[in-house]
Amino acid sequence: MSEKKFNVAVAGATGAVGNQMITCLEERNFPVKSIKLLASSRSVGRKLRFKGDLVEVEELKENSFRGVDIALFSAGGGISKKFAPIAAKDGCVVVDNSSAWRMDPEVPLVVPEVNPHAVAQYTNKGIIANPNCSTIQMVVSIDPIYRKCGIKRIVVSTYQAVSGTGKKAIDELFDQTRSMINFIDCTINVYPHRIAFNCLPHIDVFLDNGYTKEEMKMVDETRKILEDDNIGITATTVRVPVFFGHSESINIETRKHITANEVKSLLEKAPGIKVVDDPEKNIYPLAIDAAGQDLTLVGRIREDESIQNGINMWVVADNIRKGAATNTVQIAEILAKEYL
Ligand code: 25A
Ligand code: L14
């Protein structure tokens, strides 16, 4: 690896994901020459720590990206739509965590364990998109199976943590839980219904086909990352009262037959995955174990006895880390090492 260091900016630095991006840059020892922390005017003057130094948050503006080499964005789709092209024009490469650019055919959509080669397409627009959190952990876990046997169809249901929505949703679950156990009326602000002690089959907005946008992201993004439009995918995405860590029940119909044991040994060797599967000892992936680390945990691996070539598994990852910040920084690492 070259000794080169980079001027880095984080847009949306004060949010749940932006904050974690800063930590990931630190933890992974990303070659940072200088760091710029950007957010809305609300956060100007707040100080955040990077490698022991206090760095003041600046307002994100059109001229914020002059002299910046790599910008990590997580300030919402609207901000990304407007400012990513401005940053790119100033010669900066944007790795964007919002949904704004993911399905743009000119913008690569990258999960480093699966399609690192796609990073090369950053030259098209100067933008690389980070997939949706639920998509990332799913493709990490199915890709080794896909390569070995092919996949005809996927049926996935998610159990998603509130932290995906940001800090306000974390606070809401906390406040509602406290109200409930004290027999006080709950306030409902973030989601259309109470999330404490409840499950909501509703993430992001509803579309004309009756699915939510989150569900269709899992369909469209998975096909784009695997470069295969022939995979049938159907998703149901559900919000559950968990702070950190998304869980997914994934049913796969493969093209060639594979046994549960073969899947297990395949995934044991795969990058970014930890097989956690010893049901007799009550060992299987849990959100509380996935939270705070970067691996995708896979367990409950078993054959679907209702079809010829079917596998079921339970897949859990930290939605703020591997689902967002870690994956973004991993993409930046490929850029830094191989392209810039
Ligand atoms: O477009 P998408 O893809 O749908 O994404 C929408 C949101 O989802 C989160 C992320 O929220 C994103 O904004 N997200 C996206 N991808 C995700 C993923 N894969 C994901 N979450 C999980 N997994 P977030 O909370 O993590 O980050 C929000 C950040 O964006 C900054 N921001 C907002 N508007 C901005 C802006 N930055 C620049 N210009 C703008 N116009 C935001 O900074 C935050 O860093 P901030 O300064 O607005 O907020 C800092 C703190 O202020 C509090 N606060 C927020 N809103 C208000 C507020 N206080 C008062 N009034 C408000 N309206 C909060 O405490 C916040 O932490
Ligand atoms: O990245 O959990 O598309 O509310 C948008 C909604 C991330 C999570 C994305 C949520 C998301 C999110």
Image (cartoon, grey):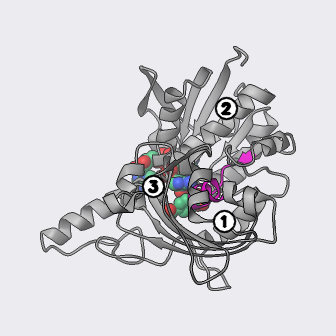
User: Does label 1 point to a residue whose CB lies under 8 Å from ligand 1?
Assistant: no
Q: Which mark is residue 275?
A: none
> Who is closer to the viewer here, 86 or 18?
18
What residue does disc 1 label?
258
Give the structural element (helix, strand or loop) at label 3: loop
| Sequence-earlier tag: 3 or 1 | 3
CA distance for labels 1 and 2: 34 Å
User: Does label 3 point to a residue whose CB lies under 8 Å from ligand 1?
Assistant: yes
Above or below: residue 50 compared with residue 246? above
Q: Which of marks 1 and 2 is in front?
A: 1
Q: Quadrant of the N terminus?
A: top right
Residue at 62% over, 50% down: 97
Crowdedness near tag 1: few (<14), some (14–19) or many (≥20) residues, C-alpha within 10 Å: some
CA distance for labels 2 and 3: 25 Å
Whether the magenta-drawn stretch holds residue 138 is answered as yes
| Sequence-earlier tag: 2 or 3 | 3
What residue does disc 2 label?
333
Q: Give the range drawn in magenta.
A: 128-142
Residue at 64% over, 51% down: 79
Q: Residue 166 carries which label?
A: 3
Left or right: 282 as drawn, with respect to 43:
left
Left or right: 254 as drawn, with respect to 37:
right
Residue at 80% over, 51% down: 107
Tell me if I can see residue 326 in this picture. Answer: yes
Above or below: residue 259 compared with residue 200? above
Crowdedness near tag 2: few (<14), some (14–19) or many (≥20) residues, C-alpha within 10 Å: some
Whether the magenta-drawn stretch holds residue 62 is answered as no
Give the structural element (helix, strand or loop) at label 1: loop
Q: Which amino acid does label 2 sit on?
A: Glu
